[in-house]
Image (cartoon, helix red, strand yellow):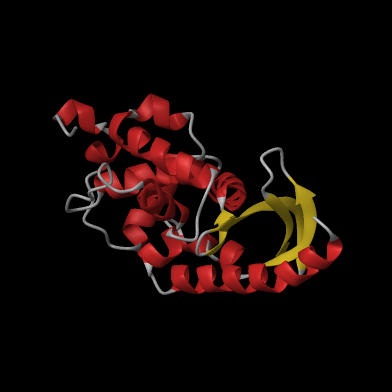
Amino acid sequence: MDREKIALAMPAIRQEFETLKQALGEGRMPSATSALFGGCLSWGDELRSIYARDDRQALSERDPLTRFFVTRFRGQEGDADIVSASGGTCFLLAFSAFPYLDALMTEMSVGDHMGFDEDGNWLVSKIIAGTMDGSRLKVDKGHQGWRFDLMSVYQTKAQAMDTFINERFCGDFDAFLWRYVADHDLAFDMDRAWRPLVEKGGI
């Protein structure tokens, strides 16, 4: 693709990414989900299985954002119908499970075009709080506009959460989870949080 076409497309990509951020901030899940594609949707499908089947040992091998998503929604009062959610919805529920990391998305903007991946998807640089973070965001031209693969942002959030738990709780995820439950005064069943749904006939 020539430079002129790229230059013409970039303003639309930047604007539609801001629209996605706004939809996420306002909780408009269907609108946000329609702007996703690629690896994040595949991971959303995988998250449904993780939510239903992973026990404590399996979850301990997952990244902390995934672990927190599963335990938070399993343990909270009232049943969250995660298993029947779409891959996009499941991904966004996990993506936004720990709101203190939302700045990694709200302060992010699209930088420059950086080429294409092996599937022909656009690669653009990511700018967070005015600084390029060195990673790439995959972008695709869908039938109704540009779509984004937020998997790299999910991974950045997971890494930030891991650092936070290591620094504040000496790497003790259980201590972190108990503190979160207490700070938010949640009606929470810790045993259920770690118990896979298959043991309860959940699927």
Q: How many numbered discs?
A: 0
Q: Nearer the viewer, residue 87 or 201?
A: 87
Where is residue 112? Give x, y as percent: 79, 63
Q: Is residue 62 above or below residue 3?
A: above
Q: Is residue 114 above or below residue 103?
A: above
Q: Which residue lies most toward the left here?
A: 201
Q: Residue at x 39, y 39 (%)?
A: 45
Q: Residue at x 44, y 64 (%)?
A: 32
Q: Residue at x 21, y 56 (%)?
A: 187
Where is residue 117? Give x, y as percent: 72, 43
Asked if residue 153 lies left or right of residue 187, the reply is: right
Point out the image quarter for the C terminus. top left
Q: Which residue lies most toward the right here?
A: 3
Q: Residue at x 22, y 48 (%)?
A: 81
Can residue 108 be seen here? The reply is: no
Where is residue 107? Give x, y as percent: 63, 70
Asked if residue 121 lies left or right of residue 32, the reply is: right
Can residue 21 be seen here? The reply is: yes
Q: Which image quadrant is residue 29 in?
A: bottom left
Q: Which image quadrant is residue 23 in?
A: bottom left
Q: Nearer the viewer, residue 86 or 61?
A: 86
Point out the image quarter for the N terminus. bottom right
Q: Nearer the viewer, residue 58 or 122?
A: 122
